[in-house]
Image (cartoon, helix red, strand yellow):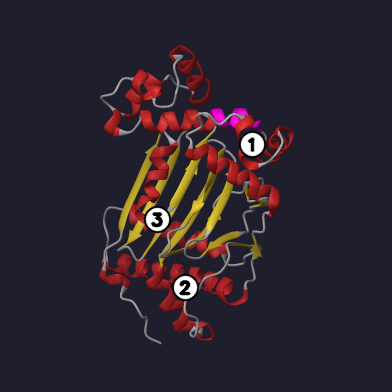
Amino acid sequence: MPYPYPIYACKPTFARSEHLAPCQQSSTYSHFEQVYHQLSRGVYSGLTTFIDFGGLFSIEMESFNQELDQWGAVGEDRFCIVFQTTDVPINRVGNQFFERDSVLCMSPGGDFDLRVTPETSFCAIIFRADFIEPLIKHFYPKLAEADRLIFPTTLAREVPILGALRSLISQLVEFQAGEAESEASAGRKHSLEFSIISLAAGLIADQAGQNVGEKLDVGHGFAKVAAIRKFMRQASGVDVQVERLASTFGMSRRQIEYLFRKRFDLSPNHYKKLILLNEFQAALLKPENCGRCIGDIAADFNIWHLSRLAQEYRELFGILPSMHRLSIQ
């Protein structure tokens, strides 16, 4: 059967970058129209490797040195699969363990909620829907009649092809990182690209056609704490005392305390402070704010005690706000 898209007509672009703040790393997903949030819990250092194939699909590998909360949703025109490249068994997606042999599969608009531990590395393969859907329907006739291949976010476990997929991606990254390219190596790269697409398309087809994965039914308690976190994040951590949360969500203080300690191992007040400091950090490091003084930026978040801010910022991120801004610039 002929391959339905000429992916080799476009030259892949390769980039590798280090990040000193979560807002830098999360910005790499903006071109996917993806809703993406990342909450840092300490001194941050991250590395991203990115290969884009003309906008049709891309491979994103990220690693970081600390515990992170990551949540959001893929773009309305994207499919995405995510798997680990390191063996860190205590990572979680929703309320479930996300293990090395598992794959998180998302169709357009699919949401995700990850809590990852230090020294974790992930690989995400992201496809444009109008590229991968015709391909899947072409090779999987039973799905050809479907209007759209939409399925709930699922966690497929004990996926036997993951070892092969990791190996293929590792080889492709080595090729892309090289400076010179011979005719023979170009042919091998095309073969790697096609193999990666084929394996990933098979994983997506399994979820669309058979729903073989484990649906992420996270339960009422998780949904509640996610809604509270969203409310706190939208307020940038400002004026979101536990009393206000209890009144807004019709819960007792004890219930909110229990949910936050169960999900995040932190009190709601501590988590609120994390959000506030992360939001302040993101504003501090924005290029458009480089001419503003730190006090003015802090005032945007109702932070008036600058010495206390400096102390808490250094305790969380390991560096003073002024020095962090200088190191980024």
At label 1, the amino acid type is: Ser
Q: Where are the magenta residues, as a range? A: 266-273
The residue identified by callout 2 is: 198
| Mark 3 or 2: the one toward you | 2
At label 3, the amino acid type is: Val
In percent of the image, x 40 and y 55: which residue is there?
Answer: 173
Q: Is residue 116 visible?
A: no
Image spot of residue 71 (x, y percent): 53, 48
Magenta stretch, main secondary structure, is helix
Above or below — where is 264 with respect to 111?
Answer: above
At label 2, the amino acid type is: Ser
In percent of the image, x 45 and y 34: which residue is there?
Answer: 45
Q: Is residue 36 visible?
A: yes
Q: Residues within 10 Å of mark 2 (few under 14, many from 20)?
A: some
Image spot of residue 51 (x, y percent): 36, 56
For the residues labelled 1 and 3, the Cα–Cα distance comes to 51 Å
The residue identified by callout 3 is: 173
For the residues labelled 1 and 2, the Cα–Cα distance comes to 51 Å
Mark number for residue 239? none
Res. 213 image quadrant: bottom right
Above or below — where is 226 with respect to 157?
Answer: above
The residue identified by callout 1 is: 247
Of helix, strand and loop, which one carries label 1? helix
In percent of the image, x 52 and y 82: which residue is there?
Answer: 143
Q: Residue furthest top?
A: 307
Q: As rendered, which of 29 and 47 lies closer to the eye? A: 29
For the residues labelled 3 and 2, the Cα–Cα distance comes to 17 Å
In percent of the image, x 34 and y 59: which residue is there?
Answer: 52
